[in-house]
Image (cartoon, rainbow, N blue to C red):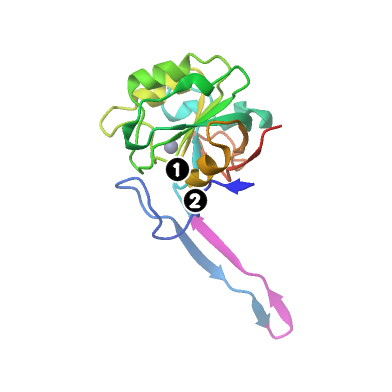
Amino acid sequence: MINISRLLKENGIVYPGDPSFKIVEQQIAGYEGTKLRSAYQIFLTKNHHGTHIDFPAHKIPSGKTSDFFPLDYFINMAVLLDKRDNKPLNYSTVTEKVGAVIIYTGDNMGYLTKEETNNLKNFKTLRMVGTDSLTIDKRGANGASHRILLEKDILILEGLCNLEKVLETYGTGQFMLYAAPVAIQNTDGAPVRAFVGEAK
Ligand SMILES: [Zn+2]
């Protein structure tokens, strides 16, 4: 298995202008006399920090939230499309068996053009589009690519890492993408532990 989720950590890279992820220590483990005190922390995080899923409600008024998607929606046969240095996307590997594509931009602010997004939207079996960028939209594009995909219930997986390893291992071939969000009720976005493994 190859991990493709970034670590959520203080001073990690966040979308420009976003507050930083924080861990607030409330208690550390120890004894008060003979009584054991448990450690616990509070996480301060935006729901779109680190590696996360955008649900339709992120950009679509009255769009679907996390509640609407069954677990199997997050497990898909996938391929990686190399868009580093703004290479044109080669869609020839996106067959009917493919439920997810990962766009490797090599850039935290890489993005999909409207044309590329429209091409992806037309693949009927697609349920998820992932990227190593922090956003699939060009800054200032007013969420155009987000909306094109989310209107079709194609979920967006942002902030992936380790894609050079995925490319090295699978090339243009298929693999399984596992990207289930943390189970949070009625949210427009949620952190994900994403990883890939052999196609099955
Ligand atoms: Zn997001």
Q: Position of residue 11 (x, y in %)?
A: 39, 60
- From the image, tell me which residue sits under label 2: 6
Q: Which residues are magenta?
A: 32-43
Q: Nearer the viewer, residue 143 or 126?
A: 126
**SS for callout 1:** loop
Q: Residue at 56% across / 63% down in the picture?
A: 41
The part of the image, by quadrant, that contains residue 10 is bottom left
Q: Is residue 135 left or right of residue 37?
A: left
Q: Quickly name the residue at label 1.
A: 159
- Check the picture and name the quadrant holding the C terminus: top right
Q: Residues within 10 Å of mark 2 (few under 14, many from 20)?
A: many
The residue lying furthest to the bottom in this view is: 33
Q: Which residue is at 59% across, 38% downward? A: 179
Name, please, the residue furthest toward the right.
34
Q: Residue at x 68, y 81 (%)?
A: 31
Q: Is residue 136 left or right of residue 167?
A: left
State yes or no: residue 41 in magenta: yes
